[in-house]
Image (cartoon, rainbow, N blue to C red):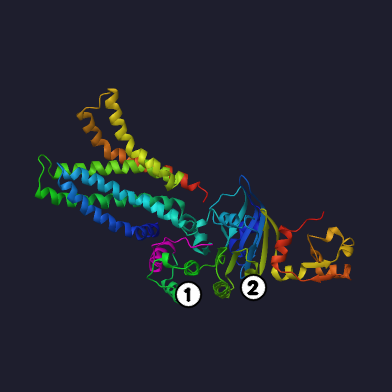
Amino acid sequence: MNHHGNTMQHPSAERSHHSIEIRNLSKSFDRFRLEDVNLTLPCGSIMGVIGENGAGKTTTIKLMLNQLKANAGQITILGYDHIREEKKLKEEIGVVFDESYFHDNIKPKHISKIMARVYQRWDHEMFSDYLKQFHLPEDKITKEFSRGMKMKLSLATALSHHPKLLILDEPTSGLDPVIRNEILDIFLDFIQDEENSILFSSHITSDLEKVADYITFLHEGRIMFSESKDELLADYGLLLCGAADFSTVDKGDIIGHRENRFGHEMLIRNKAKMAQKYKGLTIDSVTLEDIMLFYVKGDQLK
Amino acid sequence: MTGLLLKDFYSLRQYGKTMLFMLVFFAFLSAGMDNPASFFEGFMIIMSMMMAIYSFSYDNLAKWDRFGLSLPVTRTEVVAGKYLLSLILCMLGGILAFLLSSVILTFRPVEDFGLKEHLYSLVGVSAIGIFLFSILLPLIFKFGVEKSRLFLIAIFAAPTAAVISFGQLGIELPSGVVLLGLLKLLPLIAVVAFLLSFLVSNRIYCSKEI
């Protein structure tokens, strides 16, 4: 099981470099298989996990939290083994899901009292500061909160025990752009401390484009890539051409292809080299959404 | 674990107020009966322990489990919290009912039913409540609270149905002496069942995928 000798021998040394290390993680269900997931999140950075619904984002997060049992693989978070040292690990992370899981008739002031008994380092003052900052009433039941307010309440809860890592599963889905931006600002604030890091799954790729340092792309239970966002956006390109030129393009260079009435669009890697190779053709820059769509929806010409 | 208990008490507090009303209502109702104590206490204990079931429903509604297991709380603590909650509610319901029926009994004493008999009956009905919950709780952890509602009915209906069908089949019911002996053993049976039940539930919940 010792895939990663260093982590086992020097947890504290490792801790200073990586907040999450996932090695060869696999999990099978009846109709879905998460296969051989490898992922490393360096401290002080934000990793965005993208992928269509059902690609395995939530499964990966559930496995990290030991809510599902893996068939194979090893997960180390903040230097802790995610099963053997589960409780210690969970003291130091904050988790937010796509919806608030608080009971309808509970008030924020109750949450603070509950969490003070759950977390060793629960910070009342910090929590009520967040409530003020987010304009959330302390003395109202959460049933009366809007979706955005509930999400901010979840965030305030996740942040008020001084976590070192935030794990966020689609935290911005279903929220309007204004609130989404506010929430992204909170993430950027959190990451100011270089010890802190964030794992952030979302299918709203524009959110990740704004804040993420690394992007991991999951597709049908496999990792297609896990790389620095800037390098990704510099590396990938969109090759555009008409039907006549299309036949001259080396099919091996094409990752995904789309044809419309204006011609052919192809997702390619190694933009600079491709620009040399196909001098007469246009190469556009891409967004994360383009990359995701071409992998998921594009025709594979092979 | 105390955090989880606190969470349950906060979410149940609305229901608790309703329970207090019912307590008064049934106190008046039972005052007209031959022996107000045993019916009233039995009823109150079962009703109070039902609040533990409601706490599962509330958790379910809020999808609390997923969030709860992202906190520094072990699965064993989650299970222990629910068992402790059932026990506390059983005691609260029992004590309140005991006090109220004692008041009724001072105004309307029942022959051969002094404080000692009253305490025995309280312990007896508490033990029955705990025994029934020992069966029910693992079922809830295994199948979820919604599906367990059917079990709940079955568990409460089965003894009644058994007594009736025994009578109809001509099988003689155990004599009073045997029943009394059983009654004395009841607290012990309840405690053992409760502990075993906890171990079973813990095992179920620890291997559950959320």
Q: Which residue is mark 1?
A: A134
Q: Nearer the viewer, residue A238 or A94?
A: A238
- Residue type for callout 2: Lys
Q: Is residue A115 magenta?
A: yes
Residue named by callout 2 = A210
How far apart marks 1 and 2 lie (CA) works out to: 21 Å
Mark nearer the N terminus (1 vs 2): 1
Mark 1: few, some, or many residues within 10 Å (few <14, many ≥20)? some
The residue type indicated by label 1 comes to Phe
Q: Is residue A101 left or right of residue B14?
A: right
Task: Say left or right for A89 vs B83.
Answer: right
Quadrant for the C terminus of chain A, please.
bottom right
Determine the residue located farthest toward the top in the rendered image. Answer: B170
Q: Position of residue A77 (x, y in %)?
A: 58, 60
* Residue A17 visible to an observer of this rendering: no
Q: Position of residue A172 (x, y in %)?
A: 56, 67
Task: Say if A231 sits above or below B188 in the image.
Answer: below
Q: Which mark is residue B9?
A: none
Position in image of residue A224 (x %, y %) = 71, 58
The reply to whether residue A48 is in sight is: yes
Q: Quadrant of residue A176?
A: bottom right
Looking at the image, is B180 positioned above or below residue A234? above
Answer left or right for B2 relative to B167. Answer: right
Chain that bears disc 1: A
Which residue is most to the front? A261
Evaluate if marks 1 and 2 touch, with contact meaning CB atoms under 8 Å apart.
no
| Residue A267: quarter of image | bottom right
- Frontmost residue, B9 versus B206: B9
Q: Which of the two residues, B98 or A166, is positioned nearer the viewer here?
A: B98
In magenta, the rendered stretch is A98-119
Dot 2, crowdedness within 10 Å: few (<14), some or many (≥20)?
few
